[in-house]
Amino acid sequence: MSATQSLIHLLGAVALLLWGLHMVRTGVTRAYGAQLRHHISRAVANRGRAFLAGIGVTMVVQSSTATALIVTSFVASGLMTTAPALAVMLGADIATTLVAQVLSFDLSLLSPALILIGVMMHKTMTHTVHRQIGRAAIGLGLMLMALGIIVGTSEPMRDSYVMRTVFSALSNDPLIALVLAVLLTWLAHSSLAIVLLVMSFVSAEIMTVSLALVMVLGANLGGVLTPIMATLNHGPLARRVTVGNGVFKLVGVAICLPLVGFFPPLLAQLGSSATRQVVNFHMIFNLVIAGVFIFLVPTMAKIFDQLFPLKETLEGPQKPRLLDPTAIDTPVVALNCAARETLRMGEYVETMILGVMVSLEENDEDNIAALIEMDDLVDQSYKEIKLYVSKISRQEIDEDESHKITEIMSFTTNLEHIGDIAENLLELANKKTKKQLRFSDEGLSEIRELHAKVAINLKLAMTVFMSGDIAVARQLLGEKQQVNALERKGTDRHMERLREGHPECIETSALYMDMLRDLRRIHSHIASVAYPILDAAGELRKTRLKKQSR
């Protein structure tokens, strides 16, 4: 096999290793993501529990980056403070070393069995959890297969003059080797993959142990870059965790790099093979960091809280806080985030609708202007939720999750339309204020009655959306007839007042009719939340049209 062929095989094996890691992570998070996130969220009582939670969750998902993103989302949402979050990250780093220890053994015989079992589970099982376990099994099998290919491909490369020259140059310049490992880890988005690759090179005797230790330090340092880059736009709360964990690693690397030449003889006493020396160094390095900084976590948390102060302008209500990007791989959790953000969107709409009546009665132009601007928040929430749900829909979802996506999109679309109509109502109220118009007492009472019905049923619609209760959905749909009746009654009484020549009715006639019409339109959108729920339950007729007579 030529050097070019060997390099192609090696790159392909590395890609297979990364894909296997991805399959394991996505399979586990989709199967047990909700439970894993629950365990992390409970680890807020003390740093010891948080540390153990970080170990346990990362051992399962095989990705400290995934754990970091989950933790930062909790911190950004106010569910976890900086100190326990940093403790979770120390535990996550320990977990990656435990996974590396397991994978350092020769498990090549398990590869075909895991792939076979995984494919059978994924193809034959109907339950989502079982299928995702099969996906994770396939990924683990591919990882073991990739490691075998890397070792087999690396052995002929030890006689390559180019490889010997490159690794010799790196051995003479450890700082360059460190930077190279950092970049490779950042590109691969996995410190575990780079550590396993380095172990394979050492096993094939194309890399010295000293160089391998430097590369392991670089992999540990590069492993913190991905979460740091991912949280740059997540606000100061999230950056406290990722940057803090990065500082821990940077301090450890800065101390160990000048001393790396003294480590191989000491490591040889723990394991004779070069592979074991590398994987043991990876574990000891992270154990020492965890052992030192776990006691300093409260102090370090205060320092990072001061370095990244909370800015009110960045934490205003305009930014959707509940759309957790780390939950996308777990559709059941992500859909819950989208549903909660939809309720927040509904609160904006409710504020606008309640403000309509206040604006009509108090004639406050400043308050009307502020309520009109709130429609921008409704539009932004709609845009963010729609984009978030579209990402969820690209995941592997079951029928129930598909129905939930339909309900969320239907409700948010209706809320966006309601916001536009409410904005129009507020502009009508503003017009009434500027022209100093006045409704008749009877007309204002009729608007107030219809408005109250609409406001109450908006709360009912949000209850239906969250609970999916069929009985309440039927009740909401039944309210539509009552609202239509109120609009007709108001119109009829208004026409009577016009015939009687009431001056207030004559000058506000168009305004009054527009008010009734828009309130009825709003209620039509409110009642629409019941349709997807009743349709999924088989409670709706296919058509309302009568059969055509012949």
Image (cartoon, rainbow, N blue to C red):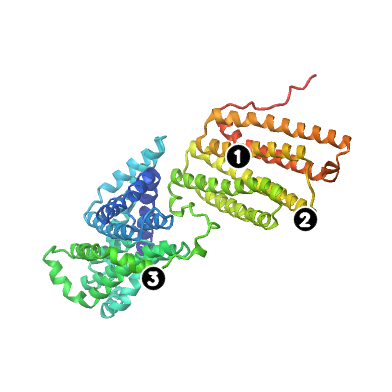
How packed is label 1: few (under 14 Cα within 10 Å), some, or many (20 or more)? many
Mark 1 to mark 2: distance in Å? 29 Å
- Residue carrying label 2: 434
- Residue carrying label 1: 458
Mark 1 to mark 3: distance in Å? 44 Å
Quadrant into which the N terminus falls: bottom left
Q: Position of residue 35 (x, y in %)?
A: 35, 44
Res 159 seen here: no
Kind of residue indicated by mark 1: Leu
Does the CB distance between marks 1 and 2 fall below 8 Å?
Answer: no
Instruction: Label 1, secondary structure: give it.
Output: helix
Of 239 and 15, the residue lying toward us:
239
Instruction: Label 3, secondary structure: give it.
Output: helix
- Residue carrying label 3: 307
Of badges 2 and 3, nearer the viewer stands 2
Q: Position of residue 332 (x, y in %)?
A: 44, 43
Q: Between disc 1 and disc 3, whose residue precedes?
A: 3
Residue under the image location 74 percent in, 22 percent down: 547
Task: Note whether 118 is above or below 20 in the view shown.
Answer: above
Kind of residue indicated by mark 3: Leu
Does the CB distance between marks 2 and 3 fall below 8 Å?
Answer: no
Q: Position of residue 198 (x, y in %)?
A: 28, 65
